Image (cartoon, rainbow, N blue to C red):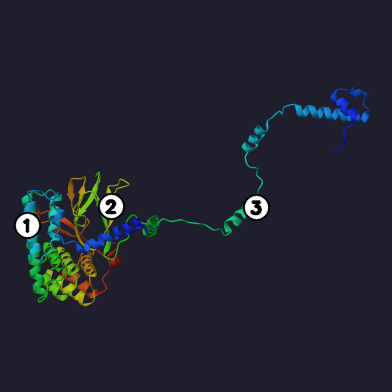
Amino acid sequence: MSPLDPRLQEALDGERDPGDLPLDLRDAYTRLTVATQLLEAPPPVSVASRVMAEIRRGPPPVLNEGLARRLLHWWLGRPRAVTVRLRPVWTLALAAGLATVLLLPWSSGIPTPGVAQGIANFVGHFPGARSVEVVGSFNDWSRGVLHLNDDDGDGIWHGEAVLPAGPHEYMFVVDGERWVPDPLAGRYVDDGFGAGQQNSLLIVRPASAQP
Amino acid sequence: MSWKLVLALALIARPAHLGAQTPPSNGTTRLPGRVPAAALPAIDSLIAAAAAESLPTEPLVQKALEGSAKNIPADRLVNGVRRGLLQLRQARAIVSHAVPGQAPPEGHVAAVAAALARGLSGPIVERLITVAPNEPPGPALHAAADLVAHRFDPDSAADLLVEAHNKGLRGVRLLDVAVAADHELQRPGGRTPSEALAHVRAMLPNVPTPARRP
């Protein structure tokens, strides 16, 4: 650092009139005085405020799309060491869940029939009915198991079920109280309770023998 | 291996293991709560009798559940189950006569009882069983019952089914024989039942398979 001229120092200390200084020193005196005033004055915006303003402004759009894609490829393609810690029970559960998802047929609303099973179609024309269900030997004559649907409200109720291959007796139950044989069954058998009522008879073909 | 894993594997393995040790049930455990209390003792007694005679009990359990679901009065419900027991006894006699010298194959008695319930006569049933004593008789019997229900002569129907069997048709394909005969009967222009049967006989074993609904 070059030493300060004593005359300039005296002028800065107020011990000499700046007007008595030579021209070059007077110019230096003026610049030093302005600098001193700038340092003494408080900044118009604090540093903290400026930093926060930069943060709020968000990241600058510096990368173009091609470069970003290349960086992503590089990051994804680079081999990395990954540590995975597994609990055997949860791993088995996860495997079972995956197997279920992969093995279940999602294209159809009913499961795929097994070797000794077949698909039974039930159709009935019951205009104005509020509900129609199928009750028979395949569900121990239980109510509420196999409901037919009439989504378009045209009075034609239908449903499908996977049943064991072989003969099954059944009836439709309309509106929860009216027992009706299936008019399309084609096969009927006396129910044996002495009132001459007939059950419908369905013979389910094994899936392998179904057309 | 954690204790949780051991427990999970044990729970998974448990049902099959215990299933082998569970004593056979005659199905009566499904009846309480569904069959009217007034009918339950008599029905239990009928089912126990069937089990004691080595007859299948499931048809009787089904009949009891069916009658209960239909709210059949207790006396008629018991009579319906009793009638089922009588048909099972008759069926066993027919099977024993058709297949002498051996215990009735599994499923034969129930299938024959169902055929009797559909109206087939004992001699027709026996004839059809004799043709193929070691095959499940259900399809042939139902095919015969279908033909009889459509007013075909029972003996002629049995003849057709025996011939179909001799030409290689088995199982549910015998049902297709009955369907084909019915179609021939309903064909425009009118065929007599014997003409329809003759026509189907001529096409054996190449009877068509129905579209979807059997």
Left/right of residue B119 with respect to residue B180 in the rendered view: left
Q: Mark 2 sits on what residue?
A: A158
Q: Position of residue B6 (x, y in %)?
A: 33, 59
Question: Is disc 2 surrounded by few (<14), some (14 to 19) or many (20+) residues within 10 Å?
Answer: some
Q: Quadrant of residue B10?
A: bottom left
Q: Is residue A33 or residue A76 the one in the foreground?
A: A33
Q: Position of residue A123 (x, y in %)?
A: 26, 53
Left/right of residue A21 with respect to residue A171 in the rendered view: right
Chain letter, disc 3 residue: A
| Residue A209 higher or lower than A12, as above or below | below
| Total count of labels | 3
Query: Which of the labelled discs sits on residue B114, or is there none?
Result: none
Q: CA distance from mark 1 to mark 2?
A: 39 Å
| Residue A123 higher or lower than B53, as above or below | above
Q: Amino acid at mark 3?
A: Leu
Left/right of residue A80 with respect to residue A49 in the rendered view: left
SS for dot 2 = strand
Q: Position of residue B104 (x, y in %)?
A: 12, 71
Q: Is residue B206 or residue B68 the one in the foreground?
A: B68
SS for dot 3 = helix
Question: Is disc 1 surrounded by few (<14), some (14 to 19) or many (20+) residues within 10 Å?
Answer: few
Q: Amino acid at mark 1?
A: Ser
Residue at 65% over, 33% down: A48
Q: Amino acid at mark 2?
A: His
Q: Is residue B143 or residue B133 the one in the foreground?
A: B133
| Residue B212 higher or lower than B38, as above or below | below
Chain letter, disc 1 residue: B
| Quarter of the N terminus of chain B within the rendering | bottom left
Q: Mark 3 sits on what residue?
A: A67
Q: Mark 1 sits on what residue?
A: B45
Residue at 93% over, 24% down: A20
